[in-house]
Amino acid sequence: MDILPSEDQAKELAITAAAIGTGLLVKKGLESGYKRTFQEDPPNAVIDRDVNWPKALSWALITGTVIYGVRIAIKRYGGQKLISDQYD
């Protein structure tokens, strides 16, 4: 029984780690842009009564779309790279 992952599993793990790491960096960038634009922290606590619903929903849609779009792009590019490496 091998303890170490196979080459394909290691590549998939690296792609997943890159996608998660990039997602976190993109989120930090979006938060920084929000602070510069609105001179306030982004709405993170939906249960807070001071949070403006339209702002909270807009923030959730924008961050979700951008972060997951980046993650999908990385995984897709990484997946294509995995396939092309197998047939080279």
Image (cartoon, rainbow, N blue to C red):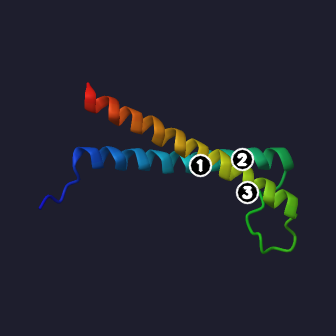
> Could you classify mark 2 by the number of other residues whose Cα lies within 10 Å: few (under 14), some (14-19), or many (20 or more)?
some
Within-10-Å neighbours for mark 1: few <14, some 14–19, many 20+: some
**Which label's residue is closer to the chain start, 2 or 3?**
2
* Disc 1 target residue: 68
Looking at numbered disc 2 in the image, what kind of residue is underneath it? Ser
Q: Residue at x 85, y 67 (%)?
A: 51
- Of the numbered discs 1 and 2, the one sitting upstream in the chain is 2
The residue furthest top is: 88
Q: Residues within 10 Å of mark 3 (few under 14, many from 20)?
A: some
Q: Are marks 1 and 2 in contact (CB under 8 Å)?
A: no
Question: Could you tell me how far apart the alpha carbons at marks 3 and 1 are, in whole angstroms?
Answer: 12 Å
Q: Is residue 31 visible?
A: no
State left or right for residue 3 relative to residue 80.
left
Q: Amino acid at mark 1?
A: Tyr
Which mark lies nearer to you, 1 or 2? 1
Query: Image quarter for residue 8?
Result: top left
Q: Is residue 57 visible?
A: yes
Number of the label disc, if any, that sits on residue 60? 3
Quadrant where the C terminus is found in the figure: top left
Who is closer to the viewer here, 72 or 33? 72
* Badge 3 amino acid: Ala
Q: Secondary structure at mark 2?
A: helix
Residue 38 drawn at (x, y percent): 85, 49
**Tag 3, which secondary structure?**
helix
Give the residue number, with chain letter if any, for mark 2.
32
Disc 3 + disc 1, Cβ < 8 Å: no
Residue under the point 86% across and 74% down:
49
